[in-house]
Image (tube, grey):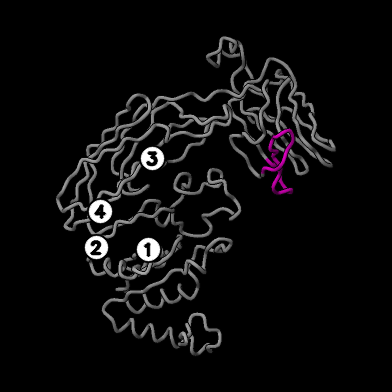
Amino acid sequence: MKRAKNPFFDESLSVEKRIDWLLEAMTLAESCDTVILALGCNSMVNAKEEVDRKTICLPPVQETLLDEIAGVNSNTVLVLLSNYPYAIISAQEKLPAILWSATGSQEMGTAAAEVLFGLYAPAGRLNMTWYRSDDQLPDMDDYDIIQGKRTYRYFDGDVLYPFGYGLTCTTFDYSDLVVKPVDGTKLQISFDLANTGDVKSDEVVQIYGTAPVSRVKKPLKQLIGFRRVRNMQPGEQRRIAFEIPISEFRFYDVISRTMMVEEGLYCISVGASSEDLRRSVSVQIPGKKTDFRYLTERIAADHYDAYDNIFLTEGQFGYTSAAVRDPEHMGRLVYRDCILPESGSLYLHLKSGEDGTAEIYLNGHKAGEFTGKTGGFTDVRVDLYPEENGETGQEKAEPVGNDPADAGRRNPVELEIRISSHVKLCYFMVK
């Protein structure tokens, strides 16, 4: 049996024939009370391992079909089948309803039909942020979600659909949120959930936490728990309880080089998505304090707090080195909460090619510089400018740590190292 040719992909069809199917679809849509328009991807063709999309927009032929059908019949429901986000701004603005589903098994069509005809109330939630355009995304090869401000944890722009988003056929109310720390290791979280609509449905409740501001850049919010609460009848109210380990707030501390929870006042929120948070409370969570960088110890170059125009590559002695990505501009490495000793010079373990340069800044003021060629990795000495010039911002201070040996040491400073192309920096220290 021969398989029928698909007019979307059959290159042998004339331009006139391609226009015919679009006109035919528009004529059919115009004559209907309601249109169900199915778009999306083939999970085995459009995006899979080693096959990346160049854009998050719909394919042009699908975008055209959507616009034309919506133009002749505004009562169009989009059924979008895909395994990844699309920038469907046009559909969001023009259509009254959108049903999204990941590609499933043989019964995927049946499941979608049951939702469309009201036999089942959907309660799925998006497991990814849906952005509005390609412009909101960094380069495809940039995997740093913190620096690139990606995902709901760090993105601070306006998105199309937030992480955790999803509607159903009823409404839910959240109330009486209570958060209690227990044994310094976990949080007991409870709240009331009520179905305030007229339809039986599931609800996916989500709990997010926001950490206090510190030297470390923390997520704007992070999901610490969720649950699908099933078969909530109209008017029904239930008490929902969670027990969340405080370890959910762990992060890698580049100074201590360990995973830690930072003590402080955290905000705990509950709601229907990362942007639809209904109730919030603050709670003091025990943990550790971030320490200082003592520059008398060897500081790995890749354990920075912030950077610009840097990539990591092979170094020496087991260290990873930092190098400049764009040779037309200087690379920048930032290290906060640094404690300088009373005296000594800064030694940079680096490799420098022709005209390589490393500039040192303390609290934003230039304090030293190295220029030259090394041939291989070696220690180069940088004498910091005398403090008497008043530019480094260094002053005597009260003890800065718990150790009595900290008495008389200086206030912590922000150290910035700017490197040119041809320079690879492994580590540094004062001695």
Please name the residue shown 17% across and 45% down the image: 237
Residue under label 3, please give it. 224
3 or 2: tag closer to the N-terminus = 2
Q: Quadrant of residue 301?
A: top right
- Picture disc at residue 120: 2
Q: Amino acid at mark 1?
A: Ser
Residue under label 1, please give it. 101
Q: Amino acid at mark 4?
A: Asp
- Picture disc at residue 388: none
Whether tag 4 and tag 2 are in contact, CB under 8 A, the answer is no
What element does badge 4 sit on? strand
Q: Amino acid at mark 3?
A: Ile
Quick one: label 3, few (<14), some, or many (20+) residues within 10 Å? some
| Image position of 338 (left or right of 77) | right
Please provide percent x and percent y for residue 250: 46, 33
- Picture disc at residue 202: 4
For the residues labelled 1 and 2, the Cα–Cα distance comes to 14 Å
Quick one: label 1, few (<14), some, or many (20+) residues within 10 Å? some
Quick one: label 2, few (<14), some, or many (20+) residues within 10 Å? some
Q: Quadrant of residue 176?
A: top left
What element does badge 2 sit on? loop
Please provide percent x and percent y for residue 388: 71, 17
Whether tag 3 and tag 2 are in contact, CB under 8 A, the answer is no
1 or 2: tag closer to the N-terminus = 1
Whether tag 1 and tag 4 are in contact, CB under 8 A, the answer is no
What element does badge 3 sit on? strand
